[in-house]
Image (cartoon, rainbow, N blue to C red):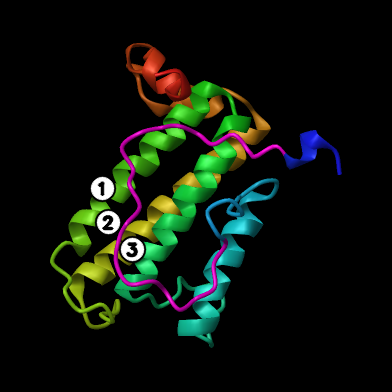
Amino acid sequence: MTAADKKPRRRYEGRGIRELRGPRSKVALPMQDEATFLTEPRAAYDAILARFRAANGPADAPSEFPNLSARDVRALANVITFALRNDLPTLSPYDAAVLWDKWREAVTSVRQLLADVRDKDATNTSSHGVRFASVLLDHRGWDLRESLVTALASPGAVFERYCPWRSAWATFERLHPEAV
């Protein structure tokens, strides 16, 4: 192993997403430095969901979104954040900024939905907040995964589709968070 192989991975320095605090999930997930969706975002994302499905069900519907507890919702959101921090430096800065912005909004919504959930073991069947946070993660996770696939296949395409005012939105801070 060379010195270059030992060099730590450069993380994306985007702001606005803190780790969701709370009790840890019982599901074994990748650690902060290990989390990634590259090189196959769909397969990597599906593998993470499969871990939750194996632990929580539904066992009879392998394509369904897994049953999640409040702690699982937080853990899933955190592992996605870790993966993005590790993966986004490999993308076009324009696409990376869009993906980070989309995920920042999703985490903000999850945080708000779980703010009133006091029972650490509340599940998507016993708590409206956990249920809505799970649905949000399902939809936003799908969008994020598909946007990542698009960004890898066609650099700049995610940015081009993001918003009509994208030129004004693409500030130096958003495109180069590591320099700010």
Q: CA distance from mark 3 to mark 1?
A: 14 Å
The residue drawn where x is 58% and y is 24% is: 92
Kind of element beneath mark 3: helix
Residue, x 17% and y 71% (percent of image)? 117
The residue nearer to you, when weighing 23 against 77, is 23
Asked which secondary structure carries label 2, the reply is helix
Quarter occupied by residue 155? top right
In three-dimensional space, the C-alpha distance between marks 1 and 2, rounded to whole angstroms, equals: 6 Å
> Could you tell me if the residues under marks 1 and 2 are in contact, i.e. CB atoms within 8 Å?
yes
Residue 73 as seen in the image, left or right of residue 29: left
In reply to whether residue 3 is colored magenta, the answer given is no
Q: Which residue is mark 1?
A: 108
Label 3 vs label 1, nearer the camera: 1
**Location of residue 110 (image quadrant):** bottom left
Q: Earlier in the sequence, mark 2 or mark 3?
A: 2
Question: Does 115 sit left or right of 30 as displayed?
Answer: left
Give residue 152's quadrant in the image.
top right
Give the magenta-colored segment's residue range.
7-30
Check the picture and name the quadrant holding the C terminus: top left
Report if the CB atoms under discs 2 and 3 are less than 8 Å apart.
no
| Residue bearing mark 2 | 110
- Looking at this view, is 9 or 175 the one in front? 9
The residue beneath circle 3 is 135
Q: Is residue 141 above or below residue 164?
A: below
Indicate which disc, 3 or 1, sits on the residue closer to the N terminus: 1
The amino acid type found where label 3 is placed reads Val
> In this rendering, would 111 be left or right of 151?
left
Q: Position of residue 137 (x, y in %)?
A: 37, 58
Residue extending farthest to the bottom is: 60
Whether residue 26 is in magenta: the answer is yes
Front one among 149 and 94: 94
